């Protein structure tokens, strides 16, 4: 997972033209709800996705104001966009209809409201797909949920120039306990690493604590109760945050300071490797869907993989790869930004050429320019420059504690076919005697039971880990740290 995207590593800045129109299209979807729905059914935040093969865009939309004068904004973490204003909404329950003049033309959504979700059809420029929207937050329950059989403590962790807000879960009695620190993947993540209603870190913390381990999980910088700005941070900063959490646990009398380790997911696995390589006191490292290749290689491989899943031609994929390499060169040289912006804008204009004339008329240069500016904000961020040049193999080779690396067999973002062998080689290079690598069959990047592993499936899958994943992890831990 890259930092701008809560669902995984980037598919490229100038990759498939579909990615650009989805950013605008999905924004329109949320705005549609606000016209005639009852206020209590609309106000608040919603999450959603267009279920197009190979594309997953994590977003948040916030509705405010009365029904007869609604307002709504959208955040697109992948593009570091926040608070974009939404417009042009109609609703006649249960049907909802909304449109948006977007990059490749007018986006049209036709859906129906059922409970706390909206599902329907999406059309734009000859592309058709399904879309789903879900209200964000805890699902309503007819019966009260019993308290967990362990202790929960809200904590604040001082970490250099920021303070991280988090939750520490502790077994009900005994101690001092072995402890795990959970490290989130890319994007603005809360302590539960929440995506489309799935809260993997909340589930993981619950499972581990029921099995006798203390667990600390924190909101990312600038998220929830944590201070700081994620847009100005890199994975090196996140590694410093991880070590601050490590020191915080070491200072507690109810934690066994010699049995504290990291569990990182996706980019969080990189952060776990970075942190562990710096501190010989780390007791264990568990890498969930962790990359073992340099960031620029990860992006290029995703352009090809996700492009083919989308049905893109090899010519279009080749053009996307060439554009991405130009992006890398510009970022590394830190010059040629105007030329890059011009190239991205030309690519956006070309993507509009094939759409019907009536839709093309709705696409203005200012609209295309705004979309390109969002992309430019990503590539000019400190995070992106660090990510494309960071090679995790160097830190993996310096880990001396026991390591478990789990991969999802169907993962299309960090496919084990590309990353497992390099990870094994890097860990072996350092002479680590306790390394376990395992590919879990039938699961995706989030370790959910999946059909294809495409990010487009995420929103519609069960909000739980696939059977056996957590037990495998806990069994490995118990053999080393009871």
Image (spheres, helix red, strand yellow):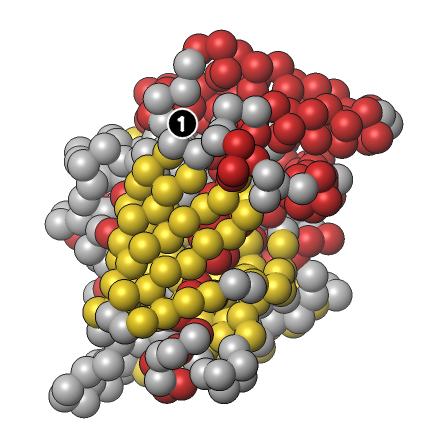
Image quarter (top left, top right, bottom left or bottom right) of the C terminus: bottom left
- Residue located at (59% from left, 44% from top): 362
In the image, residue 11 lies at what x, y percent?
A: 50, 32
Dot 1 falls on a residue whose secondary structure is: helix
Task: Answer whether residue 183 is visible to the viewer in this image.
Answer: no
Total labels drawn? 1
Which residue lies most toward the bottom here? Answer: 144
Side of 108 where 103 appears, left or right: right
Side of 456 where 304 appears, left or right: right
Tag 1 residue:
306
| 205 lies above or below 8 | below
- Residue located at (31% from left, 41% from top): 129
Name which quarter of the figure residue 146 lies in. bottom left
In the image, residue 83 lies at what x, y percent?
A: 62, 64
- Of the pair 469 and 54, the residue shown nearer to us: 54
In the image, residue 422 lies at what x, y percent?
A: 43, 20
- Residue located at (35% from left, 46% from top): 122
Side of 184 where 159 appears, left or right: right
Which residue lies most toward the front here? Answer: 358
| 164 lies above or below 268 | below
| 75 lies above or below 384 | below
Task: Answer whether residue 457 is visible to the viewer in this image.
Answer: yes
In the image, residue 63 lies at what x, y percent?
A: 49, 75
| 192 lies above or below 467 | below
- Residue located at (29% from left, 58% from top): 111
Q: Residues within 10 Å of mark 1 (few under 14, many from 20)?
A: many
Name which quarter of the figure residue 311 lies in. top left
């Amino acid at each position: 997972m890259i930092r701008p995207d809560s669902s995984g590593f980037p598919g490229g800045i100038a990759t498939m033209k579909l990615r650009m129109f989805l950013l605008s299209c999905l924004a329109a979807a949320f705005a549609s709800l606000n016209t005639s729905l009852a206020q209590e059914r609309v106000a608040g935040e919603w999450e959603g996705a267009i279920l197009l093969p190979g594309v997953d865009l994590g977003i948040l939309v916030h509705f405010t104001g009365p029904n007869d004068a609604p307002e709504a904004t959208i955040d697109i973490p992948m593009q570091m966009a926040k608070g974009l204003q939404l417009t042009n909404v109609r609703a006649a329950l249960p049907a909802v209809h909304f449109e948006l003049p977007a990059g490749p033309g007018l986006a049209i959504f036709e859906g129906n409201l059922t409970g706390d979700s909206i599902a329907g059809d999406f059309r734009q420029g000859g592309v058709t797909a399904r879309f789903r929207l879900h209200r964000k937050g805890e699902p309503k329950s007819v019966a009260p949920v019993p308290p967990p059989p362990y202790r929960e403590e809200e904590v604040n962790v001082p970490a250099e120039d920021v303070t991280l807000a988090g939750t520490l879960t502790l077994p009900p009695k005994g101690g001092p306990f072995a402890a795990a620190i959970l490290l989130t993947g890319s994007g603005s993540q809360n302590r539960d690493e929440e995506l489309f209603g799935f809260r993997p870190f909340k589930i993981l913390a619950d499972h581990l604590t029921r099995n006798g381990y203390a667990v600390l999980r924190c909101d990312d910088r600038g998220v929830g109760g944590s201070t700081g700005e994620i847009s100005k941070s890199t994975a090196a900063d996140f590694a410093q945050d991880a070590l601050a959490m490590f020191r915080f646990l070491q200072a507690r009398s109810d934690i066994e300071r010699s049995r504290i380790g990291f569990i990182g997911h996706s980019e969080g696995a990189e952060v776990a490797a970075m942190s562990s390589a710096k501190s010989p006191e780390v007791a264990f490292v568990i890498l969930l869907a962790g990359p073992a290749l340099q960031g620029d290689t990860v992006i290029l491989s995703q352009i090809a993989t996700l492009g083919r899943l989308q049905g893109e031609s090899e010519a279009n994929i080749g053009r996307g790869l060439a554009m991405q390499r130009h992006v890398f060169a510009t970022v590394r040289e830190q010059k040629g930004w105007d030329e890059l912006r011009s190239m991205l804008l030309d690519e956006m204009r070309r993507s509009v050429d094939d759409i019907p004339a009536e839709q093309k008329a709705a696409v203005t240069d200012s609209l295309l320019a705004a979309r390109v500016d969002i992309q430019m904000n990503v590539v000019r961020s400190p995070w992106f420059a660090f990510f494309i040049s960071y090679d995790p193999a160097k830190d993996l080779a310096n880990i001396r504690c026991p390591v478990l690396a789990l991969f999802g067999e169907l993962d299309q973002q960090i496919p084990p076919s590309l990353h497992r062998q390099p990870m094994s080689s890097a860990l072996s290079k350092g002479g680590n005697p306790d390394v376990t690598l395992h590919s879990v069959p039938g699961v995706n990047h989030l370790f959910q039971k999946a059909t294809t592993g495409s990010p487009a499936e995420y929103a519609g899958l069960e909000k739980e880990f696939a059977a056996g994943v957590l037990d495998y992890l806990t069994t490995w831990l118990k053999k080393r740290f009871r």
